């Protein structure tokens, strides 16, 4: 068997688009500080403004509603920290009349860990459960909203199982009860159409390296007139909403990446969905006791989360890596943890099955030959690991 190099961890990060790389290289000669008034600074500021326009346009926003950050995690932290602002001089102190966060049990670690911190800063936190597919239980959310307004933070698409939430419906519900709504759309933007006006959100987070742009650059959409205060204070960059000299090269790369996504996204969606269906059928035909996680329809086309009872996820990952195939066992931000995925536990999966799960996330470079290779290699790996396992997989239903 010829070993191929197959990258199937695009939800962890995507490779830099060749045309994004070219754009960044060209921009390297424009080294001025965008805050400087001289010609070198003005040149950098013009490039940054063009990129801001591109990012804003991609999600239906206005350029002044976009704040560039160092990452999606920073953008999420910025929004959630508004409720814990201690300053009586800050505009958000008088604008936000509540002190509660409502989120789901399957959010990204940067949200889960931040809201844990907020509980120590006199902020009430309520977690909403999800069904077996990862969908928010709407009745539970509404009952919590009835108890008083809050900042609601629900991700658009889950990074591990790919389930897509009805953010438009959640936004209407939140606003009906006087709440603000934030969505972490890092995994959604660039894979599915995302329009902030259609969704009706107050805040939205996105990140460049999830859509073939550079790492170290994210963005936060803030609807005009929405209460806000900076997480990072100092200079007047980003209209006073995020201090620190802007990452000009990262911003330029971000702008180019969304331009390219606008042209490529629809075709990629159809192609990857066909690959996903082929992969599911191929694995089901060769592997007994297999379980596919996530919503069967409202799910990212590129994402397939699979559980193999009787086979440890880390062992599957390492054996696949030896054959040249790169996958993950969940969120890259939780890598190194021995605990099972909180997302899989959140959808009600038994702990021993959660330990035997991997995430396959395809991208623009994925080919049908890559999928054929996985279907050829993975079944033998599962058989090998199960032979060494003490877990009884009899009675597990194929789904």
Image: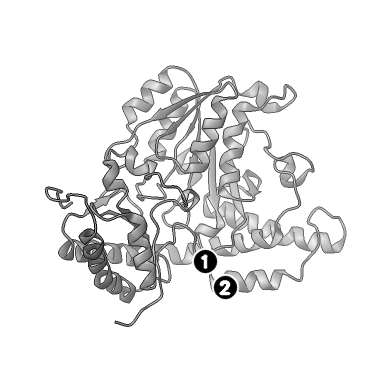
141, 349: nearer the viewer: 349
Proximity of marks 2 and 1: CB atoms separated by less than 8 Å: yes
Quadrant assignment for the N terminus: bottom left
Q: How is the image coloured?
A: one colour
How many residues crowd mark 1 within 10 Å: few (<14), some (14–19), many (20+)? some
Taking the image as shown, residue 131 lies to the left or right of residue 342, namely left
Residue bearing mark 2: 19
**What secondary structure is found at the residue carrying circle 2?**
helix
Q: 253 above or below 206?
A: below
Residue bearing mark 1: 260
139, 226: nearer the viewer: 139
- Give the residue displayed 54% in from the left and 45% down from the top: 205
- Give the residue displayed 51% in from the left and 67% down from the top: 15
Measured as percent of width and height from the top left, residue 220 is found at 59, 45
- Quadrant in the picture for residue 95: top right
Taking the image as shown, residue 327 lies to the left or right of residue 204, namely left
Residue 72's tag is none
351, 13: nearer the viewer: 351
Residue 226 in view (yes/no): no
- Give the residue displayed 28% in from the left and 49% down from the top: 293
**What secondary structure is found at the residue carrying circle 1?**
helix
Measured as percent of width and height from the top left, residue 3 is found at 35, 79
Measured as percent of width and height from the top left, residue 153 is found at 48, 35
Count of numbered tags: 2
How many residues crowd mark 2 within 10 Å: few (<14), some (14–19), many (20+)? some
Whichever of callouts 2 and 1 sits on the residue coming sooner in the sequence is: 2
Q: 121 above or below 262?
A: above
- Quadrant in the picture for residue 289: bottom left
Most distant residue in the left direction? 395
Measured as percent of width and height from the top left, residue 94 is found at 66, 21
- Give the residue displayed 56% in from the left and 57% down from the top: 208
Residue 391 in view (yes/no): yes
């Amino acid at each position: 068997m010829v070993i191929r190099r197959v990258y199937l961890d695009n939800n962890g990060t995507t490779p830099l688009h060749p045309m994004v790389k070219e754009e960044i290289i060209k921009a390297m000669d424009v080294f001025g500080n965008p805050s400087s008034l001289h010609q070198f600074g003005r040149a950098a500021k013009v490039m940054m403004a063009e990129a801001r326009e591109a990012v804003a346009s991609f999600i239906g926003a206005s350029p002044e509603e976009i704040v560039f950050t160092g990452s999606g995690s920073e953008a999420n932290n910025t929004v959630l920290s508004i409720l814990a602002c201690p300053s009586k001089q800050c505009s958000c102190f008088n604008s936000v009349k509540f002190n509660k966060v409502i989120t789901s049990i399957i959010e990204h670690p940067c949200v889960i860990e931040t809201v844990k911190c907020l509980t120590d800063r006199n902020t009430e936190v309520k977690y909403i459960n999800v069904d077996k597919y990862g969908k928010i239980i709407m009745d539970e959310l509404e009952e919590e909203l009835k108890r008083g307004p809050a900042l609601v933070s629900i991700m658009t698409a889950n990074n591990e199982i790919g389930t897509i939430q009805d953010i438009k419906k959640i936004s209407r519900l939140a606003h009906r009860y006087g709440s603000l709504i934030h969505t972490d759309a890092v995994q959604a933007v660039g894979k599915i159409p995302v329009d902030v006006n259609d969704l009706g959100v107050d805040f939205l987070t996105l990140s460049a390296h999830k859509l073939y742009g550079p790492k170290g650059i994210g963005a936060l959409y803030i609807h005009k007139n929405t209460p806000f205060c900076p997480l990072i204070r100092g200079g007047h960059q980003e209209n006073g909403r995020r201090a620190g000299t802007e990452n000009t090269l990262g911003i330029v790369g971000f702008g180019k990446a969304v331009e390219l996504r606008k042209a490529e996204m629809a075709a990629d969606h159809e192609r990857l969905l066909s690959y996903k269906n082929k992969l599911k059928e191929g694995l089901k035909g060769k592997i007994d006791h297999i379980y596919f996680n996530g919503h069967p329809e409202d799910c990212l086309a590129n994402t397939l989360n699979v559980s193999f009872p009787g086979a440890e996820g880390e062992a599957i990952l390492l054996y696949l890596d030896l054959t040249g195939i790169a996958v993950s066992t969940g969120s890259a931000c939780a890598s190194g943890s021995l605990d099972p995925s909180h997302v899989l536990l959140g959808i009600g999966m038994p702990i021993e099955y959660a330990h035997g799960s991997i995430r396959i996330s395809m991208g623009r470079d994925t080919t049908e030959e890559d999928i054929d290779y996985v279907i050829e290699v993975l079944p033998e790996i599962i058989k090998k690991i199960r032979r060494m396992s003490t877990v009884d997989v009899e009675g597990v239903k194929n789904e």
